[in-house]
Image (spheres, helix red, strand yellow):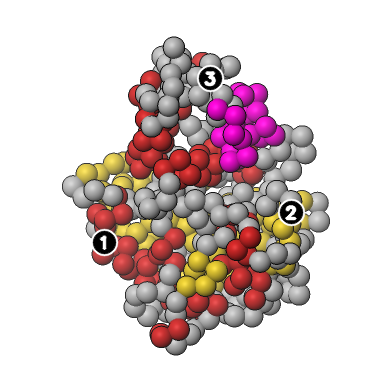
Amino acid sequence: MPCGSRSGRSNRLVGAALAALLLLAACGQSGITVPATAPLQLSAWGLMNSDGRQLLLAEGVMPYSLNAPLFTDYAHKLRTVSLPAGQAATVNSDGSLNFPVGTVISKTFFYPRTPLGVARSADSDADLLPHLGDYGGLDLAAVQLLETRLLVHQPQGWTGLPYVWNAEQTEAVLEVTGDIKQLNMVDGAEQTAFAYIVPDQNQCGSCHGTNTATRQINPIGPHIANLNRTVAKAVAGPVPAADSGPVGQLQLWQQRGLLNLTQPAADYAVMAAWQDPQQPLAARARSYLHSNCGHCHSSTGPADTSGLFLDQATSNPVRLGECKLPIAAGQGTGGHQYAIVPGKPAESILVYRMQTRDPGAMMPELGRSLVHTEGVELVSEWIAQLPGSCA
């Protein structure tokens, strides 16, 4: 049974709360002022506000959805972007976005609550669609806020800032050294104690430093192909119920003055939604690996010396791991010989590293303490149908 079906009531509450939160996001683009020094409190940024009962976005702060969200121990994420008034992002030749100085991207991590802990359920962007109830904002009685990470585009480049929410859920405080939250995850009758890790400021660069030559950090998720999807019209503000159907997110960004497109939105690439079983298996698996591994495992990323490239730009089967011997995996091989053995996921190093919780072997190295069961199953299914052998 898919994990998302085991916490139906919690998901409905979260979905309803997020739905109304999106309805309250203002139509206009006003932007915020980036302070010269990072404030100690998240509220000082003017992005969002919490009174302990509801989390509300400020005017001009735009929530957005991704086709292929990153896995982080089953945490749900509220993603937003705020651009300086009168300025828009442009599309680079590789599909990345060139955001103007003064842009602030936020990602708030939270879990649905249960009486025994936090619920294990899929981080589905469907929760962002206004389809249930009429809450005044994100209902904090239904969710537990953990952290809000900011990426701030300053004149000297992007800066990552981790803010940790207090127990009352009224404020988040800058914690440059990160934090650890001891949580209990509930999945039906099963419970799992785990440590949720808030990365320190330097670790932000470990993932977002996607080019070892420049060593600059950059946004990862908001890529044109990952943003190219449909969302509810109500994201742009309240609309009549009869007119609340889907609209292209790229068009919506353009209408809101956030993005300048040089061609019709339909002509841009679309990243496969790896959670959608109706889409091709190979496209879903490659999309998952790109979002979770490709920012490091690429020809320019921090893991370039491994020779294993899992980004979507890579097409060479050996570079993707088929019958590829490890270069410096050490104990990370799990006793296996090749990164991917076509037709044999259980003999593939890639699958072993995804499903182990050994800190010295697990991948990704940051961002998870738990095994992403659905991700392992997806990649295993893809490897199982690959033709050929390593004999």
> Residue at the right extreme?
155
Residue 8: which disc?
1
> Which kind of residue does numbered mark 3 sit on?
Lys
Judging from the image, what secondary structure is the residue with disc 1 in? Answer: helix
Who is closer to the viewer here, 103 or 269? 269
Task: Give percent across and percent down for residue 6.
Answer: 24, 54
> Quadrant of the image for the C terminus?
top left
Judging from the image, what secondary structure is the residue with disc 2 in? Answer: loop
Q: CA distance from mark 3 to mark 1?
A: 42 Å
Which mark lies nearer to you, 3 or 1? 3
Q: Is residue 243 magenta?
A: no
> Which kind of residue does numbered mark 2 sit on?
Asn
Please give the residue where the numbered disc 3 appears in the rendered image. Answer: 324
- Badge 3: residue crowd in 10 Å (few <14, some 14–19, many ≥20): many
Is residue 126 visible in the rendered image? The answer is: yes
Q: CA distance from mark 1 to mark 2?
A: 40 Å
Report the residue at 41% width, 63% height from top: 126
Judging from the image, what secondary structure is the residue with disc 3 in? Answer: loop
Task: Give percent across and percent down for residue 183.
Answer: 35, 47
> Residue at the left extreme?
189
Which mark lies nearer to you, 1 or 2? 2
Please give the residue where the numbered disc 2 appears in the rendered image. Answer: 92
Residue interval drawn in magenta: 295-317
Report the residue at 37% width, 62% height from top: 143
- Image-quadrant location for residue 294: top right
Q: Is residue 86 above or below residue 153?
A: below
Is residue 71 visible in the rendered image? The answer is: no
- Badge 2: residue crowd in 10 Å (few <14, some 14–19, many ≥20): few
Q: Is residue 96 above or below residue 384?
A: below
Task: Give percent across and percent down for residue 225.
Answer: 59, 54
Who is closer to the viewer here, 95 or 234? 95
Who is closer to the viewer here, 41 or 91? 91
